[in-house]
Image (tube, grey):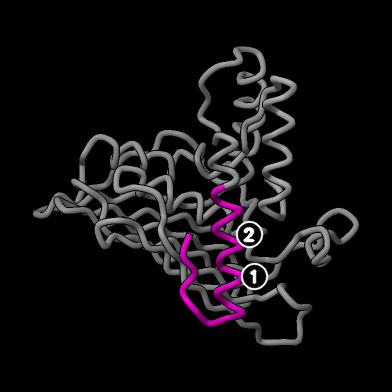
Amino acid sequence: MAITVEECNAILKTVKKTRGILHIGFEMRISPVWKKVKEMIEKGSIGKPVYGIIELWRGPYRSGSNGWRYDAKRVGSWILEEPVHFLDLACWYMEEVGEPISVYARANSKGGNCPGLTENMSFIINFPEDAYVVVNQTLSAYEHHQSVKIVGTKGALYARWDGPVDEAANPTFQLEYYNGKKVRRVPIKKMAGELYEIEMEIRAMVEAVQKRGATCLATPEEGKRAVALCIAGEKSVVSNRVIKL
């Protein structure tokens, strides 16, 4: 949404004043894989969620238009680049439990990158009732492998997506559901991955503007929350302390 909480607040203030339409395009919420995880949690398939791991194993970022991803002034940090999506997923999946209450983060790099552009990142996000989610990402590996594991009081979900790159046209993906006794494969009927989900996101945004109503996209408040979590993560990396939210 922005690279500081203050910028998020300024956007929110302007939208309220102008009565404009604002939704945040976290495309992972639209993904047939990661969205199905949310739907099954909401149905009560695993009971109350208590623990999760969201993980990405990939190679280095592309530079982006005019090299913005490698410019800390424009990207903010690499904690704000891709992990903002995973921190949003963590909050989305734990919605039943409540808002995040604290975060502890670590980050480092194998080489001498600019400050904030760290290749390896880990977060422990704490929620009420002792629930927590671990988010891990590395840019120092190869290919593109993402997974989500959510454990609840009555079962568990394990989803994964694998491809040679993030925009793979023919990736492999699957979702497994464990009810406490047996494991079964959950059918995913649509193609998943950035190549397809960004098109879905664009369609969702057009529909949100046309209908001015409910949408599968994130609210401005949820966008701000994800940015605030990233900023708290950055503070935790520097201070090596748990940051309360």
| Residue at 59% over, 43% down | 223
Residue 59 numbered mark, or none: 1
Depicted 215 relative to depicted 117: above or below: above
Residue 50 numbered mark, or none: none
> Disc 1 residue type?
Gly
| Residue at 76% over, 62% down | 62
Quadrant (top left/top right/bottom left/bottom right) for the N terminus: top right
**Label 2's element?**
loop
Label 2: which residue? 165
Counting from the top left corner in percent of width and height, residue 202 is at: 67, 30
Residue placed furthest toward the right: 66
Depicted 59 relative to depicted 96: above or below: below
- Magenta highlight range: 225-245
Q: Is residue 156 magenta?
A: no
> Disc 2 residue type?
Val
Pick the residue in front: 135 or 5: 5
Counting from the top left corner in percent of width and height, residue 18 is at: 74, 21
